[in-house]
Protein backbone atom coordinates (compact mmCIF):
# COMPACT_ATOMS: atom_id res chain seq x y z
CA UNK A 1 0.00 0.00 0.00
CA UNK A 2 2.81 2.41 0.80
CA UNK A 3 5.44 3.59 -1.66
CA UNK A 4 9.13 3.23 -1.04
CA UNK A 5 10.53 5.95 1.23
CA UNK A 6 13.00 6.89 -1.50
CA UNK A 7 10.11 8.02 -3.70
CA UNK A 8 8.80 10.28 -0.94
CA UNK A 9 12.21 11.80 -0.25
CA UNK A 10 12.76 12.33 -3.97
CA UNK A 11 9.52 14.26 -4.30
CA UNK A 12 10.32 16.41 -1.28
CA UNK A 13 13.79 17.13 -2.64
CA UNK A 14 12.46 18.00 -6.10
CA UNK A 15 10.00 20.42 -4.54
CA UNK A 16 12.73 22.07 -2.52
CA UNK A 17 11.22 20.87 0.73
CA UNK A 18 14.52 19.53 2.01
CA UNK A 19 16.32 22.85 1.57
CA UNK A 20 17.48 24.36 4.82
CA UNK A 21 16.99 21.24 6.91
CA UNK A 22 20.58 21.31 8.11
CA UNK A 23 21.52 23.81 10.79
CA UNK A 24 24.67 25.90 11.01
CA UNK A 25 26.50 23.44 13.25
CA UNK A 26 29.50 21.65 11.76
CA UNK A 27 27.90 18.23 12.28
CA UNK A 28 25.03 19.19 9.96
CA UNK A 29 27.22 19.11 6.88
CA UNK A 30 26.65 15.39 6.56
CA UNK A 31 29.51 14.12 8.75
CA UNK A 32 28.60 11.53 11.36
CA UNK A 33 29.30 12.20 15.03
CA UNK A 34 29.77 9.49 17.66
CA UNK A 35 27.39 10.16 20.55
CA UNK A 36 27.18 8.26 23.82
CA UNK A 37 24.02 6.12 23.72
CA UNK A 38 23.21 7.27 27.26
CA UNK A 39 22.92 10.85 25.98
CA UNK A 40 20.27 9.89 23.43
CA UNK A 41 16.54 9.69 24.19
CA UNK A 42 13.61 8.45 22.06
CA UNK A 43 11.09 10.97 20.74
CA UNK A 44 7.92 10.77 22.88
CA UNK A 45 5.89 11.65 19.76
CA UNK A 46 7.45 8.85 17.73
CA UNK A 47 4.63 7.00 15.88
CA UNK A 48 6.07 3.58 16.70
CA UNK A 49 5.06 2.59 20.22
CA UNK A 50 6.04 -1.10 20.19
CA UNK A 51 9.10 -2.97 18.94
CA UNK A 52 9.18 -6.65 18.03
CA UNK A 53 11.62 -8.26 20.49
CA UNK A 54 12.77 -11.00 18.10
CA UNK A 55 13.43 -8.56 15.25
CA UNK A 56 15.21 -6.18 17.61
CA UNK A 57 17.41 -9.00 18.89
CA UNK A 58 18.23 -10.03 15.32
CA UNK A 59 19.25 -6.45 14.50
CA UNK A 60 21.31 -6.30 17.68
CA UNK A 61 23.17 -9.49 16.72
CA UNK A 62 23.93 -7.91 13.34
CA UNK A 63 25.17 -4.73 15.02
CA UNK A 64 27.58 -6.74 17.18
CA UNK A 65 29.20 -8.12 14.04
CA UNK A 66 29.03 -5.21 11.60
CA UNK A 67 28.36 -2.18 13.78
CA UNK A 68 25.71 0.46 13.02
CA UNK A 69 25.97 0.82 9.25
CA UNK A 70 23.59 3.79 8.94
CA UNK A 71 23.84 6.73 11.32
CA UNK A 72 20.73 7.70 13.23
CA UNK A 73 19.42 11.28 13.07
CA UNK A 74 19.08 13.32 16.26
CA UNK A 75 18.43 16.87 17.39
CA UNK A 76 20.07 18.57 20.39
CA UNK A 77 17.84 18.94 23.44
CA UNK A 78 19.93 21.07 25.80
CA UNK A 79 23.47 22.20 26.56
CA UNK A 80 24.15 19.09 28.63
CA UNK A 81 24.70 17.04 25.49
CA UNK A 82 21.29 15.33 25.46
CA UNK A 83 19.86 14.49 22.03
CA UNK A 84 16.40 13.44 20.87
CA UNK A 85 16.02 10.81 18.17
CA UNK A 86 14.43 12.00 14.93
CA UNK A 87 15.02 8.83 12.92
CA UNK A 88 16.61 5.51 13.84
CA UNK A 89 15.19 4.49 17.22
CA UNK A 90 15.39 0.78 16.30
CA UNK A 91 19.09 1.14 15.51
CA UNK A 92 19.67 2.96 18.80
CA UNK A 93 17.82 0.29 20.78
CA UNK A 94 19.74 -2.45 18.98
CA UNK A 95 23.04 -0.71 19.71
CA UNK A 96 22.19 -0.48 23.42
CA UNK A 97 21.18 -4.14 23.41
CA UNK A 98 24.48 -5.02 21.76
CA UNK A 99 26.38 -3.22 24.53
CA UNK A 100 27.70 -0.38 22.37
CA UNK A 101 28.78 2.73 24.26
CA UNK A 102 28.44 5.17 21.35
CA UNK A 103 26.53 5.30 18.08
CA UNK A 104 27.12 7.29 14.87
CA UNK A 105 24.59 10.07 14.44
CA UNK A 106 23.79 13.05 12.26
CA UNK A 107 22.76 16.14 14.22
CA UNK A 108 19.88 18.13 12.78
CA UNK A 109 17.53 20.82 13.97
CA UNK A 110 13.99 19.49 13.65
CA UNK A 111 11.81 21.17 11.02
CA UNK A 112 8.25 20.43 9.91
CA UNK A 113 9.61 18.88 6.72
CA UNK A 114 12.03 16.65 8.60
CA UNK A 115 9.31 15.61 11.00
CA UNK A 116 7.09 14.69 8.04
CA UNK A 117 9.90 12.46 6.76
CA UNK A 118 10.25 10.88 10.20
CA UNK A 119 6.58 10.04 10.35
CA UNK A 120 6.49 8.88 6.75
CA UNK A 121 9.42 6.53 7.33
CA UNK A 122 7.61 4.91 10.25
CA UNK A 123 4.17 4.75 8.69
CA UNK A 124 5.54 3.03 5.62
CA UNK A 125 6.80 0.14 7.73
CA UNK A 126 4.28 -2.66 7.42
CA UNK A 127 4.59 -3.77 11.07
CA UNK A 128 3.00 -0.65 12.56
CA UNK A 129 -0.39 -1.22 14.17
CA UNK A 130 -3.55 0.49 12.94
CA UNK A 131 -3.50 2.77 16.00
CA UNK A 132 0.16 3.73 15.54
CA UNK A 133 -0.54 4.73 11.94
CA UNK A 134 -3.64 6.65 13.02
CA UNK A 135 -1.63 8.59 15.61
CA UNK A 136 1.08 9.31 13.04
CA UNK A 137 -1.45 10.64 10.54
CA UNK A 138 -3.04 12.73 13.28
CA UNK A 139 0.38 14.18 14.16
CA UNK A 140 0.96 15.11 10.52
CA UNK A 141 -2.37 16.94 10.53
CA UNK A 142 -1.37 18.77 13.73
CA UNK A 143 1.87 19.74 12.02
CA UNK A 144 -0.21 21.60 9.46
CA UNK A 145 -0.26 19.14 6.56
CA UNK A 146 -3.51 18.88 4.61
CA UNK A 147 -5.21 15.57 3.88
CA UNK A 148 -4.09 15.73 0.26
CA UNK A 149 -0.49 16.50 1.28
CA UNK A 150 -0.43 13.54 3.66
CA UNK A 151 -1.91 11.28 0.98
CA UNK A 152 0.72 12.43 -1.50
CA UNK A 153 3.52 11.92 1.00
CA UNK A 154 2.47 8.38 1.87
CA UNK A 155 1.27 7.39 -1.58
CA UNK A 156 -2.23 6.58 -0.33
CA UNK A 157 -5.72 7.65 -1.39
CA UNK A 158 -7.22 10.60 0.51
CA UNK A 159 -10.07 8.33 1.62
CA UNK A 160 -7.51 6.11 3.39
CA UNK A 161 -6.09 9.14 5.21
CA UNK A 162 -9.62 10.10 6.29
CA UNK A 163 -10.22 6.64 7.72
CA UNK A 164 -7.04 6.68 9.78
CA UNK A 165 -7.82 10.22 10.96
CA UNK A 166 -11.21 8.99 12.09
CA UNK A 167 -9.75 6.28 14.32
CA UNK A 168 -8.57 8.74 16.98
CA UNK A 169 -12.15 10.05 17.26
CA UNK A 170 -13.73 6.63 17.71
CA UNK A 171 -15.01 5.30 21.07
CA UNK A 172 -12.40 3.81 23.40
CA UNK A 173 -13.53 0.25 22.64
CA UNK A 174 -12.84 0.70 18.94
CA UNK A 175 -9.53 2.46 19.58
CA UNK A 176 -8.46 -0.56 21.61
CA UNK A 177 -9.21 -2.74 18.58
CA UNK A 178 -6.99 -0.40 16.55
CA UNK A 179 -4.19 -1.03 19.04
CA UNK A 180 -4.75 -4.75 18.47
CA UNK A 181 -4.27 -4.05 14.75
CA UNK A 182 -7.80 -4.60 13.49
CA UNK A 183 -7.75 -3.33 9.84
CA UNK A 184 -8.85 0.27 9.41
CA UNK A 185 -11.54 -0.64 6.85
CA UNK A 186 -13.12 -3.10 9.28
CA UNK A 187 -12.94 -0.46 12.03
CA UNK A 188 -14.65 2.12 9.82
CA UNK A 189 -17.45 -0.36 9.06
CA UNK A 190 -17.75 -1.26 12.74
CA UNK A 191 -17.91 2.41 13.73
CA UNK A 192 -20.81 2.89 11.31
CA UNK A 193 -22.67 0.07 13.08
CA UNK A 194 -21.78 1.54 16.49
CA UNK A 195 -23.78 4.63 15.56
CA UNK A 196 -26.78 2.42 14.79
CA UNK A 197 -26.67 -0.04 17.68
CA UNK A 198 -23.95 0.48 20.27
CA UNK A 199 -25.12 -2.45 22.39
CA UNK A 200 -24.96 -4.91 19.48
CA UNK A 201 -21.43 -3.79 18.61
CA UNK A 202 -20.30 -4.18 22.24
CA UNK A 203 -21.66 -7.73 22.27
CA UNK A 204 -19.91 -8.42 18.97
CA UNK A 205 -16.56 -7.16 20.30
CA UNK A 206 -16.87 -9.25 23.47
CA UNK A 207 -17.79 -12.38 21.53
CA UNK A 208 -15.13 -12.40 18.81
CA UNK A 209 -11.31 -12.25 19.00
CA UNK A 210 -9.75 -9.10 17.58
CA UNK A 211 -7.87 -11.08 14.91
CA UNK A 212 -11.21 -12.35 13.56
CA UNK A 213 -12.71 -8.88 13.11
CA UNK A 214 -12.72 -8.23 9.37
CA UNK A 215 -15.01 -6.52 6.88
CA UNK A 216 -16.67 -9.90 6.32
CA UNK A 217 -17.52 -10.51 9.99
CA UNK A 218 -18.61 -6.89 10.43
CA UNK A 219 -20.87 -7.28 7.37
CA UNK A 220 -22.57 -10.18 9.14
CA UNK A 221 -23.09 -7.97 12.18
CA UNK A 222 -24.53 -5.24 9.97
CA UNK A 223 -27.02 -7.72 8.47
CA UNK A 224 -28.12 -8.76 11.97
CA UNK A 225 -28.56 -5.16 13.09
CA UNK A 226 -30.52 -4.22 9.97
CA UNK A 227 -32.68 -7.31 10.29
CA UNK A 228 -33.42 -6.47 13.92
CA UNK A 229 -34.28 -2.88 13.10
CA UNK A 230 -36.44 -4.04 10.23
CA UNK A 231 -38.38 -6.43 12.46
CA UNK A 232 -38.90 -3.71 15.05
CA UNK A 233 -40.10 -1.27 12.40
CA UNK A 234 -42.51 -3.82 10.94
CA UNK A 235 -44.18 -4.41 14.30
CA UNK A 236 -44.85 -0.72 14.71
CA UNK A 237 -45.71 0.02 11.09
CA UNK A 238 -46.95 -3.05 9.21
CA UNK A 239 -46.91 -1.17 5.93
CA UNK A 240 -43.16 -0.71 6.30
CA UNK A 241 -42.68 -4.32 5.19
CA UNK A 242 -43.22 -3.15 1.63
CA UNK A 243 -39.90 -2.22 -0.04
CA UNK A 244 -41.64 0.78 -1.65
CA UNK A 245 -42.38 2.20 1.81
CA UNK A 246 -38.97 1.48 3.25
CA UNK A 247 -36.30 3.57 1.45
CA UNK A 248 -32.72 2.98 2.57
CA UNK A 249 -29.56 5.00 2.31
CA UNK A 250 -28.48 2.81 -0.59
CA UNK A 251 -31.78 3.37 -2.37
CA UNK A 252 -31.47 7.10 -1.86
CA UNK A 253 -27.94 6.99 -3.18
CA UNK A 254 -29.04 5.12 -6.28
CA UNK A 255 -31.84 7.56 -6.86
CA UNK A 256 -29.50 10.53 -6.63
CA UNK A 257 -26.96 9.00 -8.96
CA UNK A 258 -29.51 7.95 -11.57
CA UNK A 259 -31.37 11.27 -11.45
CA UNK A 260 -34.62 9.84 -10.10
CA UNK A 261 -36.74 11.85 -7.69
CA UNK A 262 -38.15 8.80 -5.97
CA UNK A 263 -36.72 5.33 -5.32
CA UNK A 264 -37.98 2.65 -7.64
CA UNK A 265 -37.45 -1.04 -8.19
CA UNK A 266 -35.01 -2.02 -10.96
CA UNK A 267 -37.81 -3.48 -13.10
CA UNK A 268 -39.73 -0.19 -12.91
CA UNK A 269 -36.92 1.89 -14.36
CA UNK A 270 -37.48 3.15 -17.91
CA UNK A 271 -35.72 1.34 -20.70
CA UNK A 272 -32.58 3.04 -22.01
CA UNK A 273 -32.99 5.43 -24.86
CA UNK A 274 -29.31 5.81 -25.74
CA UNK A 275 -27.77 2.53 -24.59
CA UNK A 276 -25.66 4.23 -21.88
CA UNK A 277 -25.30 2.84 -18.38
CA UNK A 278 -23.73 3.90 -15.09
CA UNK A 279 -21.69 1.43 -13.04
CA UNK A 280 -22.35 1.89 -9.34
CA UNK A 281 -20.03 0.72 -6.58
CA UNK A 282 -20.24 0.58 -2.81
CA UNK A 283 -17.57 1.82 -0.40
CA UNK A 284 -18.61 1.18 3.17
CA UNK A 285 -22.09 2.70 3.47
CA UNK A 286 -21.62 4.98 0.47
CA UNK A 287 -22.74 4.41 -3.09
CA UNK A 288 -20.71 6.01 -5.85
CA UNK A 289 -20.57 6.06 -9.62
CA UNK A 290 -17.44 4.81 -11.37
CA UNK A 291 -16.03 7.42 -13.75
CA UNK A 292 -14.85 5.42 -16.75
CA UNK A 293 -13.67 8.53 -18.61
CA UNK A 294 -11.12 9.51 -15.95
CA UNK A 295 -8.00 7.51 -15.13
CA UNK A 296 -6.69 7.26 -11.58
CA UNK A 297 -3.03 7.90 -10.86
CA UNK A 298 -2.63 4.35 -9.57
CA UNK A 299 -3.25 1.33 -11.78
CA UNK A 300 -4.91 -0.30 -8.78
CA UNK A 301 -7.51 2.44 -8.21
CA UNK A 302 -10.45 4.05 -9.98
CA UNK A 303 -12.11 7.45 -9.91
CA UNK A 304 -15.49 7.45 -8.18
CA UNK A 305 -18.11 10.20 -8.02
CA UNK A 306 -20.06 10.54 -4.76
CA UNK A 307 -22.96 12.76 -3.70
CA UNK A 308 -24.26 13.20 -7.23
CA UNK A 309 -20.96 14.50 -8.53
CA UNK A 310 -20.17 16.92 -5.71
CA UNK A 311 -17.22 14.81 -4.53
CA UNK A 312 -14.82 12.84 -6.73
CA UNK A 313 -12.09 10.65 -5.20
CA UNK A 314 -9.52 8.12 -6.28
CA UNK A 315 -10.49 4.87 -4.54
CA UNK A 316 -8.33 1.71 -4.30
CA UNK A 317 -9.93 -1.29 -6.02
CA UNK A 318 -9.70 -3.22 -2.76
CA UNK A 319 -11.96 -0.65 -1.06
CA UNK A 320 -15.00 -1.06 -3.30
CA UNK A 321 -17.58 -3.63 -4.27
CA UNK A 322 -19.43 -3.44 -7.59
CA UNK A 323 -23.04 -2.76 -6.73
CA UNK A 324 -25.29 -2.33 -9.76
CA UNK A 325 -25.44 -1.24 -13.39
CA UNK A 326 -28.02 1.52 -13.87
CA UNK A 327 -29.55 2.44 -17.22
CA UNK A 328 -29.34 6.14 -18.03
Image (cartoon, rainbow, N blue to C red):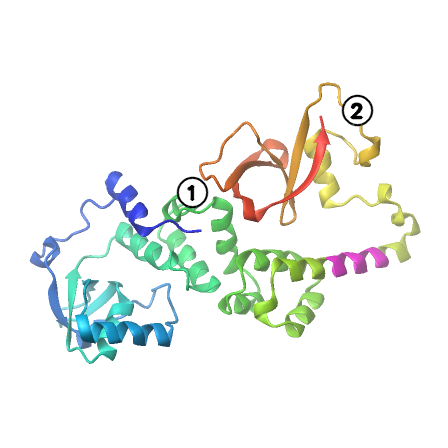
Locate the C terminus by quadrant.
Answer: top right
Quarter holding residue 120: bottom left
**Direction bottom: furthest residue:** 99
Q: Residues within 10 Å of mark 1 (few under 14, many from 20)?
A: some
- Residue holding disc 2: 271
- Residue drawn at (17%, 77%) of the image: 100
- Residue drawn at (9%, 57%) of the image: 25
Q: Position of residue 217 (x, y in %)?
A: 66, 62
Q: Position of residue 87 (x, y in %)?
A: 26, 61
The mark closer to the camera, 1 or 2, is 2
- Residue drawn at (39%, 43%) of the image: 152
- Please say if 153 is above or below 327: below
Q: Position of residue 29 (x, y in %)?
A: 10, 53
Element carrying mark 1 = helix
- Residue holding disc 1: 148
- Between the C-alphas of marks 1 and 2, the distance is 41 Å
Residue 230 lies in the magenta-colored region: yes
Quarter holding residue 281: top right
- Please say if 312 is above or below 185: above
Given residues 225 and 56, the one toward you in this image is 56
Given residues 220 and 251, the one toward you in this image is 220
Magenta stretch in the rendered image: 223-232
Whether residue 324 is visible: yes
Whether residue 196 is visible: no
**Direction top: furthest residue:** 274
Amino acid sequence: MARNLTDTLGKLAAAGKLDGIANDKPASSGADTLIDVSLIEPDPEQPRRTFDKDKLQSLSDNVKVHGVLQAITVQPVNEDGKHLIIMGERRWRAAKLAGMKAIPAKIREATSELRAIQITENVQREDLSTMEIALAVEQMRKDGLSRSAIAESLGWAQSTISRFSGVVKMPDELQELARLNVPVLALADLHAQWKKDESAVRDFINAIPAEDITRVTVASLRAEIEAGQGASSSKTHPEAESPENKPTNLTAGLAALSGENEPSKPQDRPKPTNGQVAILCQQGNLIGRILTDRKARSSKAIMVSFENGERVEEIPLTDIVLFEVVEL
